[in-house]
Image: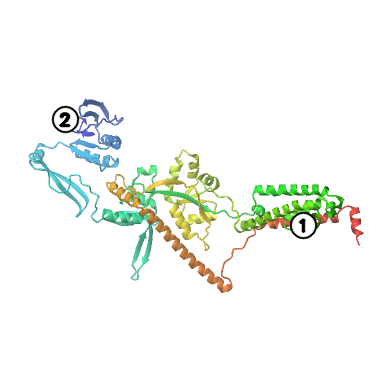
Amino acid sequence: MALDHIPGKSKGILPENLPVSITKMPQLPHLGRVQKPYWSKSTGQGDKDVIEVEGKEANETQALLSRLTVEARQLRQASWCVTVVVMSDDPTFLTAFSDTSLKNRLLVWSTRLIVLTRLPLTQIQELVASKLGVYVHLPYGSQGSQTICVASWSEQHGLAHTSTLPVFPEKYDNFHGAKVSVAATTYKPLWVEKQEVTKDGRVITHRYGMDYFLLETIAKAMNFTFEVIPITLWSEALDLTSNRKVFATPVYHTLLYHRYQFFEFSVGYTYARYCFSMAKPQLVTNWLSLYYPMDDLVWAFILMALMLVPAVLQLMVCMVPESGGGAKHMSWVGVVETVLAVLLAQSVPHRLLTVTSLRPIVAAWIVVAVVLGAAYRGSLIASLTLPKYPSRPETIEELVNTVIKMTVMPWGVAFATDFSKSGSPLFQRLADIMVVGKDDIVSLQQAIENKQAHMSGIHKMQQDIAEHFTQLDGSTRLYIGRESLMPGLSAWPIPHDAPYRPQLDIHITAVVEAGLYDKWTEDMMELTRRESRARRREEKATVLESHQEDEPQSKDIIRPLNLTQILGPILLLAIGLVTAGNGSRCVFRGTPRFREEVLRVP
C-alpha cells in the first residue's frame, strides 16, 4: 500500500515501475474533496490502485491520516505480508503519520516500512557521494540498547554486509540479562508473596506459585531478570500492560472479547474455571425425620400389607370351626392389633397359633416384620447421624433463581460486562446480581452470614476455603457449585503488538507440554493441604488442652443429636398424648348410661 503527501495538493501518483504492490483503498467520505475516487490498471504484476485526496488544512490532513491508517490496518490484518510506502517532503506530515500509525496499530513487528522523500539537490549529492548505511536497533543487546550498522550500500558496490548480524535479526531470542518489569500481587495459588523480617531488620519477600514458576522458567530461557511492580488491584496491572509500562501481567486472565481493545494475550495455556461458592444449607425443623429412612414405595408396600394381612387373617378366622379354640372368638380389632404388634416387634397372642392353618401366614408376617424393622432401625440411625440436607444451588439457573447478590472482585466487572451483552437471558440475569466485593475472605464470610454467593477462580476459592473456613474436624460451611460460570481459555495479558510474543508463546507452550504447569498446580494444592492440616492440628491440640483442664476424662469431642433431628419422635409422642387425652375425655364425658356402668364397678 502506498501513501503519498505533497504540500498544497496531495496526489497519490506513483511510478508505474515501482516494485511495490499498490493495493486499492476504499473512498473515505467527509475527509477532503476526492477528485478521483480511485482508478485501477491491470498489469502483469498485479493491480495498481491509486486514490487522490486533497487536504488543505492541518486538521483535515490529520483526520485523513487517522481514517486512512484504520483502513490500512484492516488490510494489514487480512494479509500475511504488507509493505507500507510513505512519500512526503513535509517533516510535520511524517511526524503525524508516525503518531497515527502507532495509535491505530498500522505498523507491527512484521510490517515493512519504506519512506520516500525528495531532498534538495545538494543533500542528494552528498548522500550519493557517501555510503548509505543499513542500521538495526537492538533494544536488548549484549551491551544494552544499541544501534548497529549491519550493511552499507553504494552505487558502485551495491549492498555489502558489515556485521555478522543479518539485516533482519531476531531481537528477542536473548535479552542478554536485561531487566524487565512485571506487575503482580498475591493471588493464591498462582502468585504468592510472603514477607520475612531478618535478624538485622531487613524485609525479604519470598514469591512462589504456579504462574511465578512459569515466569521464572521463561526468564531463564529468554535470559532476562524481572522486577515486580507492587499493585493493590489487578486492574492496575492491566492498566500498566495497556500503557506498555510492563513486560506482561504474569497471572492468567480469561480471554474476553472486549479486553482485546486494551491489550493482547499470550498463547492460551490453561482453562480458568470460574465458579461460585455459597453456604451449605442448614437443617430445618421437619417432622418427617421418621419418614425419611424408607422410600415411598416401601411405605406404600407396608401400608398395603397392613390392609391385606389383617383382612386375610380375619377371613381365615371366620372359617375356623367352633373347635378352633380362642381364635374363633377374635374380633377384627384383635386381628389388627396382632398384626401391628408383630410389626412393632411385640409378642403374638397364643390363640392365633393354636390353629394350624393360621401359622404359615403369621410366620410369614413375622419374617417380613423382622426384616422391615431391622432395615428401618438401621436407616433411622443413619438418617439421624447423617441427616438429609435441603437442596442447594448447583447450576447457573438455580443460582440466579435463589440469590439476589453475588460478589466479585474488581476484575469481575469485565465478566459482568460480557454477561450483560450476552444473548442469553440467563447470563443477563447473572450480570444483574453481580456486585463488587471488598475482599475474597470478607465476601466468603458474607456468603455464610447472608443469602448470597461469591464468584472466583476455582484454584483461588479452594485455597481460601481450605485456609480460612475449615473446621477442626475437616468440615466447612461453604461449598463450590458444580457448574462453572465461565470455563474460558486463559493466558497472560501483554501489550498490543508485543514483538517478543512469538518467543514468549514458544516457551509457554514448551512448559505446558512438558507437564510442568500441572506439576506445579499439584504441588501448590498439596502445600496448601499440608499447611491447613498442620494448622488444624495445632488448633485441635489447643482445644483439647482446654478441655482436659475442665474435664480430665474427656479426650474426644462428640457431636450430639440436636432437636431438629429427633423432632419426628417428639411430634409422634405429642400426637399420642393428645389422642390419649381426647380418649379419656370421651370416657369421662360419655353418655349417662356409660357413666352409671362405670360407677357400678366395685
Q: Tell me, yes or no, whether the two marked residues, 1 and 2, touch with CB atoms within 8 Å.
A: no
In the image, 215 versus 329, the foreground residue is 329
Tell me which residue sits at (81%, 51%) in the image: 333
- Residue 42 lies left or right of residue 464; in this view the side is left
Q: Which colour scheme is used?
A: rainbow
- Residue 113 lies left or right of residue 529; in this view the side is left
Describe the element under mark 2 as helix, strand or loop: loop
Q: What is the x, y in percent for residue 359?
A: 77, 53
- Amino acid type indicated by mark 1: Val
Which residue carries the number 2 mark? 17
In the image, 157 versus 292, the foreground residue is 292
Q: What is the x, y in percent for residue 154?
A: 9, 41
Describe the element under mark 1 as helix, strand or loop: loop
Residue 202: quarter of image? bottom left
Which residue carries the number 1 mark? 348
Q: Which of marks 1 and 2 is in front?
A: 1
1 or 2: tag closer to the N-terminus: 2
Vertically, is 30 above or below 142?
above
Q: Decide: few, some or many residues near mark 2? Use Cα within 10 Å; few <14, some 14-19, many ≥20.
A: few
- Residue 175 showing in the rendered view: yes
* Gap between marks 1 and 2 measured at Cα: 117 Å
- Amino acid type indicated by mark 2: Asn
Q: In which quarter of the image is the N terminus?
A: top left
Q: What is the x, y in percent for residue 353?
A: 79, 55
Point out the residue furthest to the front here: 356
- Residue 292 lies left or right of residue 489; in this view the side is right
- Residue 188 showing in the rendered view: no
